[in-house]
Amino acid sequence: MKVVQVGIGGMGNAWLSAVRKSEDVDFAGFVEINDDIARRQAEAYGLDPALIFPTLPQALAAVKADAVINVTPPQFHRDLTVYALEAGLPVLQEKPLAHTLEDARAIAAAAEDTGALCSVAQNYRYLPFSQTIKSLLDSGELGAVAAVDVAFYKGPHFGGFREEMAQPLIVDMAIHQFDAMRYFLGSDAVTISARSWNPPWSWYAGDASAAVQIGFASGAQASYTGSWCSQALETTWNANWRFECERGVLLAEDDRVTVQKLLRVGEGPGALVNVHEERREVSLAPMERAAQDYLLHEFYEAVAQGARTGTSAQDNIKTMELVFGIVRACDSGQPVSLD
Ligand SMILES: NC(=O)c1ccc[n+]([C@@H]2O[C@H](COP(=O)([O-])OP(=O)(O)OC[C@H]3O[C@@H](n4cnc5c(N)ncnc54)[C@H](O)[C@@H]3O)[C@@H](O)[C@H]2O)c1
């Protein structure tokens, strides 16, 4: 499969590396609007400068491509992705699907109408950490999940578009954890209450901190608290998770997964007591390919088979409705229902 990658700076590096590593996918060309970045990346990766075009239409007119990888900032996603889909090309699209719900719906509709695959890079699903949680929950050994607690605290100084966004934490970062909640629970959100704020020392224009409560159709309640301008004692990028289950608890903290199961309710001195098994650390599930490598291979296979990926635009629109429902709840100060 020959691809055109649009946007080769920033996160574009991860996709340049993933395609280079792939045995199935190769580059037909590139699109980059910033000449300095184009020059720098051509040198760094040994790219042919004649294959780096300033616009997608120019690239597609000049080279023969089977697919497009879109790694531009969110406000450019709709125009570029819809253009490619309407040209009959499947698209592997960086998250968030778009910077507004309206644009995200337009992309999902274009994927539906053209029948071309649009797959969204929710790479946090496809890491050993997440796969270990998913298989433990799916095994049923802990029973139903009643509640999920997520804590995320980081203080990255990215510069660029994130520092101008109204809701950088929720739309650009916590989207991974909200998407992972849907994935882990196998259920969609129905109710939201949320509050966001910007700490006085924040270097973001928009709100870099948030507290969110989500009710899922399964009956599970999820709570998320996070900040993107934390000053110390950061969590890992995967965040810390606690799942309160019918027959025990799954803790996933500092990229380690631990389980403790309830064995029985026994007689204690004067009262009943819960008797537990020993707390058990679970080895992370090995993966042949993870993150971008996984997504690229999944995309390649889905295109070859005329199938959808796990994070197609038609699925991802549910993550976008959740994310923008949270933004609406923050803006209005009112609970939001997603029915
Ligand atoms: N999945 C992840 O873990 C992850 C991590 C980081 C970024 N991202 C996503 O990747 C996307 C890009 O983020 P970034 O951090 O790389 O941004 P960035 O601004 O650092 O880089 C974007 C690149 O695209 C180029 N570009 C911008 N508009 C263009 C256009 N119209 N045509 C061609 N090139 C264009 C820029 O010049 C730059 O080289 C965002 O949607 C972001 O949320 C995802």
Image (cartoon, rainbow, N blue to C red):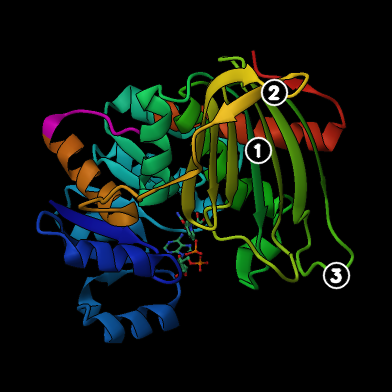
Part of the protein shown in magenta:
305-310
Q: Quadrant of residue 42?
A: bottom left
Camera-nearest label, 1 or 3: 1
In three-dimensional space, the C-alpha distance between marks 1 and 3, rounded to whole angstroms, equals: 26 Å
Q: Which residue is mark 1?
A: 149
Percent position (x, y) of residue 143?
48, 19
Instruction: Compare marks 3 and 2 and give the one earlier in the sequence.
Output: 3
Residue 48 lies in the magenta-colored region = no
Percent position (x, y) of residue 67?
22, 48
- Crowding at dot 3, Cα within 10 Å, few <14 / some 14-19 / many 20+, comes out as few
Amino acid type at circle 2 is Gly
Q: Which residue is mark 3?
A: 201
Q: Which residue is mark 2?
A: 268
Determine the residue located farthest toward the front in the rendered image: 269
- Identify the element where label 1 is drawn: strand
Percent position (x, y) of residue 310?
33, 32
Residue 54 in sight from this viewpoint: no
Q: Is residue 149 above or below residue 206?
A: above
**In the picture, which quadrant includes the C terminus?**
top right
- Identify the element where label 2 is drawn: loop
Amino acid type at circle 3 is Trp
Q: Main secondary structure of the magenta part?
A: loop
